Image (tube, rainbow, N blue to C red):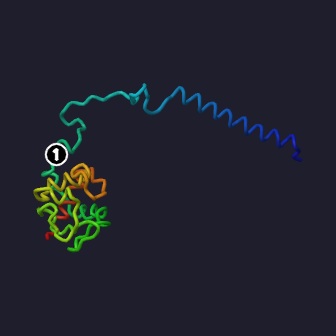
Amino acid sequence: MFDTMTSTKIIGGLCGTFLVFLLGNMAAGSLFHVGAVSHGAEEHAMAYPIEADGEGGGGDAETTVDFATLLASADAAKGEKVFGKCKACHKVDGSNGTGPHLDGVVGRDIGSIGDFGYSEILAELPGNWDPEELSHFLENPKSYAAGTKMSFAGLPKAEDRANLIAYLASLGG
């Protein structure tokens, strides 16, 4: 029923079909390019800019709402969920882990837990952890205090930082 010639024709037909699809894909890729176009060292996205006026035009919420307003409307329950990212190193039961305990951290002097070995930069920083300072530190610890031992990348969303600080403030100390 199936001899060698029939099998060869079937395999050849499949290979020919795949070849047609491959060539069609390459032709379509050259006609319809998706992504950024590189011109030397400069890279340009292929799109049309949408101009927006300054009022109500999709601006970044972080630039229009100050942190104090975000903190006033922060949700400590959401902050407890955000604290899940911190639990690996920090505790809230008064004992130190890899990082210092965070009981009463809001308003506490920077680097003031006596039995914790802070990095040199944090031990020497003046001031206290008021909500604004905590927000700046939590956004990107490495840029706030270059040389800190804290390896956490940071919380880029201001709402997450506000919720976390509200949660930490609710713990007291």
As rendered, which of 128 and 56 lies closer to the eye? 128
Is 32 drawn above or below residue 108 in the view shown?
Answer: above
Q: Camera-side residue: 141 or 126? A: 126
Q: Residue at x 11, y 59 (%)?
A: 128
**Amino acid type, residue under disc 1 in the picture:** Val
| Figure check: 96 above or below 85 | below
**Residue at the image position 18 percent from the left and 34 percent from the top:** 55
Q: Quadrant of residue 113?
A: bottom left
Using the image as rendered, state which of residue 126 and residue 83 is in the foreground: 126
18 displayed left or right of 152:
right
* Mark 1 element type: loop
- The answer to which image quadrant residue 46 occupies is top left
Split into 4 quadrants, where in the image is the C terminus? bottom left
104 relative to 40, above or below: below
Q: Position of residue 24 (x, y in %)?
A: 62, 31
- The residue pinned by badge 1 equals 65
Within the image, what quadrant is residue 15 found in? top right
- How many discs mark residues in the rendered view? 1
Image position of 42 (left or right of 112): right
Percent of width and height locating residue 79: 24, 61
Residue 54 x/y as whole percent: 19, 32
Give how far across and how far down residue 100 sits, in percent. 23, 67
Q: Is residue 87 above or below residue 156?
A: below
Q: Is residue 126 left or right of residue 38?
A: left
Q: Residues within 10 Å of mark 1 (few under 14, many from 20)?
A: few
Please report the residue visible at 54 percent of the width from the left and 27 percent of the height from the top. 30
